[in-house]
Image: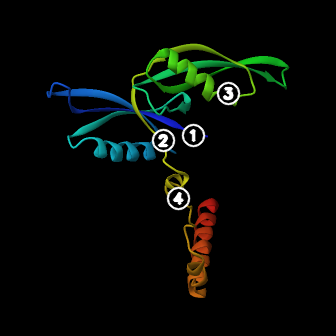
Amino acid sequence: MQTWYECKVKYLKIDQGGYERKVNDNYLLDAISFTDAEARIFQKMQEITSAEFQVMNIKKSNITEVIPGETGEWWYKAKISLVTVDEEAGKEKKVNQYILIMADDINQALKRLEDGMAYMLVPYVATSMQLSTIVEVFPYDNDEELQDKIVERKPLVAESDTDEISESDESEELEDIDSYEEDDDSTLSE
């Protein structure tokens, strides 16, 4: 499952009139942690602008799915409600999910939502649709890019290092332990 992060970035942008103005834009990106999100937004912003920029805020997004479109000028945020059954309690439970959809208008966004959610077996209801403040979405391009980010954990001591411990090192450690125990016994007897 993807984890989406919203990043707010402040930078100078040249508008349609050719004037520079400060803007605060929101970007959505797929990342595996806050650190990865920060690194990715810095990389993407360096590609987007040559001006100085500041990452003002990074937060986990409540968006669960993104439905991109080949065309579309805006990102719409849809809230859908699903009804699931809690088998342990035997009660119905309402679950809300948020989906980001690229479209030119709200009607096209609703149509793309229907098409994008056609795979769902559970019935859902679209409870709201609003224009989002997200300017651009940066998913991982492919699984290889994600795999490059996952770091393999290595043991703190390599196996070859443990073989090289000499007997003298072990005996020094044992002497230190014995002297500690003697000091501890002397304090108890006083």
Say which residue label 4 marks.
151
Cα gap from disc 2 to disc 3, whole angstroms: 22 Å
* Label 3 element class: loop
In this rendering, the answer to whether 171 lies above or below 112 is below
- Going by the numbered disc 4, the residue's amino acid type is Val
Cα gap from disc 3 to disc 1, whole angstroms: 19 Å
Cα gap from disc 1 to disc 4, whole angstroms: 18 Å
Cα gap from disc 3 to disc 4, whole angstroms: 36 Å
The image position of residue 91, as x and y in percent, is 82, 17
Q: Please tell me the numbered disc located at residue 2.
A: 1
Q: Which residue shows up at 62% across the image and 77% down it?
A: 174
Say which residue label 2 marks.
139
The image position of residue 149, as x and y in percent, is 49, 54
Q: Which residue shows up at 25% across the image and 41% down it?
A: 49
Point out the frontmost of discs 2 and 3: 3
Q: 141 and 152: which one is in front? A: 141
Q: How is the image coloured?
A: rainbow
In this rendering, the answer to whether 131 lies above or below 42 is above
Point out the frontmost of discs 2 and 1: 2
- Going by the numbered disc 3, the residue's amino acid type is Ala
Q: Which residue shows up at 79% across the image and 17% down it?
A: 92
Q: Are marks 2 and 1 in contact (CB under 8 Å)?
A: yes
Instruction: Say whether disc 2 or disc 3 marks the residue closer to the N-terminus.
Output: 3
Q: 152 and 18: which one is in front? A: 18
Point out the frontmost of discs 1 and 4: 1
The image position of residue 69, as x and y in percent, is 49, 31
